[in-house]
Amino acid sequence: MNKQMMLDWLIQAADQESDRWPRYKRGYSEALSELQGRRDPAPLPRLPRNSSEAVPLVREHFRDDVTRASLVLHRHFPKEYLFYRVSKLEEEVFEGLHFLAETVPEFAFGFDRVGRTGFGRYLELNRALLGFARAHWSRARDPQGRLLYFLYEGLGRLFLEKSEYNRYWIMATKSEYWPDLNGGKKIDWSGRKDMRAGDLVFMYRTSPRKAITNIYRVLEGPRFDPWGAWEGFWADLAPVCDVPDITFAQMRADPVLGEWWVVRKQLTGTVCDPVPHSVYNRFLELLPESLRQQHGLVPEELAPSCSSGHYDSERHFETEVIEPLLERWVFQYQRQYPCRFCVGSQYVPARVDYLVSDEHGPLTVFEDKLRIVTDRHLQPAVDQAKSYALMLGLPSFVVASPEAIRVYSLERQQERLAMEVATEELARESEALRALLLRLRA
């Protein structure tokens, strides 16, 4: 991938498309309200005209909340401070900035995200982006729109990892939105960054029915609105069908649905949450067969293992299974460890799910998948993990999924399955796995 060509394209696209990312058109108070979940903001203290005196007051008022503090500073001192929305796209944005750092040295930051209260990191990012804007959009009176497009629409989309499996979601709506649902028309709804076209959405009405009543389909990948409420992602949904009520009481009493964390928290705080494959399959079992056939609703392929389909994302699986396992082994680990492949004269960035080390140094790598049911799912994961191990000079690699943990030895670029443990057996076989990984390095 030619970095300079990509950079030139991003700069040009931001210049041409920046009108899509304008200054917030409504009032200043409304903008703050939107960014804090449509709640009224607390009154601001009167700010001095000198920015160096204003910054400490703004930081204290917002307790270093970068999103809201940067909005206030941008409004009062637009030539000195940019509005920066801390979002779920930070990982992708900074992966892109680090990728471009060889071409744009000011993007060589010593951190991988700003974070909600990382005001000091925001100041460093702000200086770099203002310098970048002066160099590339010198004629623009206000570079804010171009930089928002460059960060979120440009880098955010380019470096967003595409899922390899079908995703399902549950959304909750209050009674005031019922007319939109009953109208059978396309609706615009708060979404998630990892949605994609074709995903199915189960719509839950919070009152008075307290039931899933409709299925929708995502029409295209979500749009990110830096000014938007909640997480700022919006998705267009088209109706698929109405369904016989699947009530909350029914879900709570169900042996599968009742164990789902969304039901266990009684859908409190649910705007848009992921649905694990096992839950999706159970929803289908509760629908009439004629409805499933009419709309092509087919279950996901799962293994007999009770863990198969239990997790709603790879990150969920890693948090619940992989990280506790590594901590039990007293190994150090780096999640999403950045490394680079050399392809011709270009370096292509990659991220290893986990680089695992002990007191003697790097030990192995983990490649995690949400589902591995057949060899069709397994072989690409093995090839990917093998490439990482070879690149890092490691003697083994691990392919992990809710179905099983598989350890491979690696010698002369040839892999061999050394041990496979069903996830349900991890507690019993944990020490044997650990001993094997250490032995393969010896």
Image: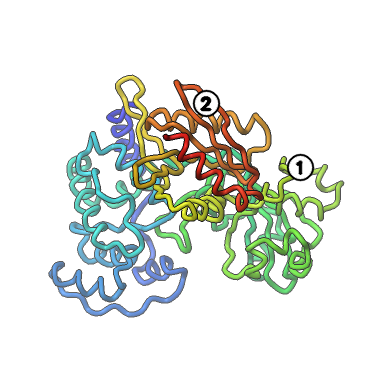
Q: Residue at x 34, y 68 (%)?
A: 28
Foreground: 110 or 226? 110
Q: Which residue is mark 2?
A: 415
Q: How many marks?
A: 2
In what element is the residue under mark 2? strand
Foreground: 155 or 396? 396
If you read the primary sequence from the N terminus, does the residue marked by circle 2 or circle 1 appear first? 1
Residue 188 locus on image (x, y percent):
57, 55
Where is the C terminus found, in terms of image quarters? top left
Residue 356 locus on image (x, y percent):
42, 44
The dot on residue 298 is: 1
- Judge from the rendering whether residue 131 lies leftward or rightward of residue 292; answer left or right: left
Residue 391 drawn above or below residue 247: above
Q: Residue at x 44, y 60 (%)?
A: 228
- Quadrant in which residue 81 is drawn: bottom left
Q: What's under tag 2, amino acid-wise? A: Glu
Q: Residue at x 62, y 51 (%)?
A: 428
